[in-house]
Amino acid sequence: MEGRMTRRMLIAGNWKMNGLRQSLVFMEEIRDVANSRADLDILVAPPATLIERAARIAGPVKIAGQDCHTEQSGAHTGDISADMLKDAGASHVILGHSERRADHNEHSAMVRAKALSALSAGLIPVICVGESEAERRAGTAELVVGQQLADSLPDRSGYVIAYEPVWAIGTGLTASLDDIAAMHGFIRSKVPGGSDVQLLYGGSVKPENASGILSIGDVDGALVGGASLEAASFAAIIEAAPIRFAS
Ligand code: 13P
């Protein structure tokens, strides 16, 4: 059996800094979709203020934080630890998203420290990597992503990787299917135990392009931003995921 057949698909929605209490009706709709697609995992990363409420009504939908601190507690005003996310009901945490790398100067060594903290709290880190437009144009995309992997990944297993080319995030541009396949193959070749690691693509995933992207053998799911804010479009992306094996 090919390695990929042992990896479950994971469709994840990253709400970023969006969502108030009323947005949680979304969870009820997605819970119904999740009940009909037990062959795959569905993950929602609401803002931290909604994690506990979302987790209470999530059913089979898993909940993620969008960041955590490197420490589990202490004098770090405004920060949230992996222990706290776990306590609130999260199972995953997104780390090293390009928006955090840009807005908060997060570098890969910090991402690795956060990933270790997440793993020790019992959370699954979803570690994001991806090149900028200039880096892709210069032909250095693999070099950049390879370095991010080398510096960001913890020396322990149990993480998910999301390849999110920065130029495709929120722009409506997506990498071509060939480029996604090539980069995912490259990432898998660079990661210890790569054939077992869940590897997501992110960057303007929409109902219209989801089926093509999710049919690539090395793509194990999607990390969806804008299209995860509406239940109808997120559900359509989930439905576009191929059934790899019966649950
Ligand atoms: P968009 O789907 O809005 O491009 O965002 C992708 C993303 O950053 C998910 O983490």
Image (cartoon, grey):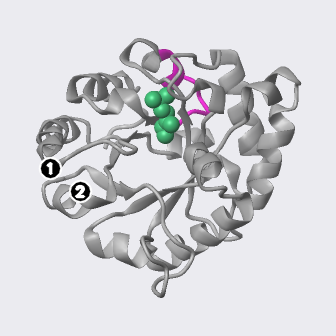
User: Looking at the image, which residue is at 56% across and 59% down?
Assistant: 159
Residue 126 higher or lower than 12, as above or below: below
Q: Secondary structure at mark 2?
A: helix
Q: Which residue is mark 2?
A: 50
Under mark 1, the amino acid is: Arg
Residue 177 higher or lower than 222, as above or below: above
User: Looking at the image, which residue is at 45% across and 71% down?
Assistant: 79
- Quarter containing the C terminus: top left
Q: Is residue 228 left or right of residue 106?
A: left
- Quarter containing the N terminus: top right
User: Looking at the image, which residue is at 71% across and 21% down?
Assistant: 179
Question: Is residue 221 shown to the viewer in this render?
Answer: no
Q: Which residues are magenta?
A: 212-220
Under mark 2, the amino acid is: Leu
Question: Is residue 65 shown to the viewer in this render?
Answer: yes
Spot the residue most to the top.
208
Q: Which residue is mark 1?
A: 21
Residue 119 higher or lower than 93, as above or below: below
Spot the residue most to the front.
77
- The location of residue 29, given as percent across then percent down, is 13, 36
- The location of residue 124, given as percent across then percent down, is 48, 63
Q: Please tell me whether residue 218 belongs to the stretch shown in magenta.
A: yes
- The location of residue 42, given as percent across then percent down, is 33, 44
Prevailing secondary structure class for the magenta stretch in the rendered image: loop
First-in-chain label (2 vs 1)? 1
